[in-house]
Image: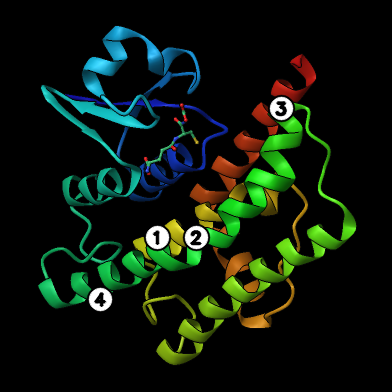
Amino acid sequence: ATLKLYGFHISPYSNLVEATCKYLGVEYEFVETHPLIDTKKEDYLALNPYGLVPTITHGDFVLYESIAIARYVAKISGDKEFYPHEDFQQAAKVDSLIDYEVGTFRKAGITYNNEAFYAPLFKGVDRPNEERMAELQKDLDDSFGLIAAILKRNGGPYLAGDKLTLVDFTVFFANQHQLQLAGAKYDAHPEFAEWYDRISEIPAVAEVLTNLKTKFAEFTGKK
Ligand SMILES: N[C@@H](CCC(=O)N[C@@H](CS)C(=O)NCC(=O)O)C(=O)O
């Protein structure tokens, strides 16, 4: 069966799944699903009780939560490096970084986006004053410092070491709204900036980012 991806081109979680499919050559049918409208309908809630995008179906199999989906996609793709699931210890190393990313690193970006991007865009709230913007950027910079430290410790050029893995994608896409759309800066830590540029040049990632910007321009144009 073909994988069906219920997603939204402006969702970073949806983008993670799309980029993973593209990178690993897994074909999918994209079902455009508006996160605030379509996900609250009964038929969608039957698939995903959280009412969020993304969700996939693969035959009768249904799965939500973007990182779990990306792992599943890697497993069905035949890939053994991007998510090295056949090597328990290697996979556990990647998972350890992913857990750190989700639990610790992501927070600054979420706060930045809520205050400086989503509230002005969706709620008509003013952008924070200069002082608050500087604080938000500083917290973001500190979070990039955590990633820079991992790159130094593991020797780079990727987060888990010499090979690109799923954690490079999860960290990258967790930063996508603030860096790609909201104008946050990422030059405070050169190791982070070099890594970020390296990931953004991967063709599968570049394709998803181009699409994101086009859709975002359409979306803001419509409003
Ligand atoms: N932890 C979830 C997060 C998914 C998520 O928050 N999706 C947003 C779109 S970016 C959504 O569907 N929001 C709808 C809502 O909040 O009602 C994942 O990784 O898949």
**Circle 1 crowding by C-alpha within 10 Å: few under 14, some 14–19, many from 20:** some
Q: Nearer the viewer, residue 31 or 142?
A: 142
Q: CA distance from mark 2 to mark 3?
A: 23 Å
Regarding mark 2 in the picture, which secondary structure is present there? helix
Q: Nearer the viewer, mark 4 or mark 1?
A: 1
Q: Nearer the viewer, mark 2 or mark 3?
A: 3
* Percent of width and height locating residue 172: 52, 59
Residues at marks 1 and 2 touching, judged by CB atoms closer than 8 Å = yes
**Circle 2 crowding by C-alpha within 10 Å: few under 14, some 14–19, many from 20:** some
Q: CA distance from mark 4 to mark 1?
A: 14 Å
Q: Say if 11 sits above or below 67 in the image.
A: above
Which numbered disc covers residue 123? 3
Q: Which residue is mark 1?
A: 102
* Percent of width and height locating residue 175: 58, 55
Of label 4 and label 2, which has the lower sequence position?
4
Which numbered disc covers residue 106? 2
Residues at marks 3 and 4 touching, judged by CB atoms closer than 8 Å = no
Quarter of the picture containing the N terminus is top left
Q: Say if 162 sits above or below 28 in the image.
A: below
Residue type at the position of mark 1: Val
* Percent of width and height locating residue 199: 54, 63
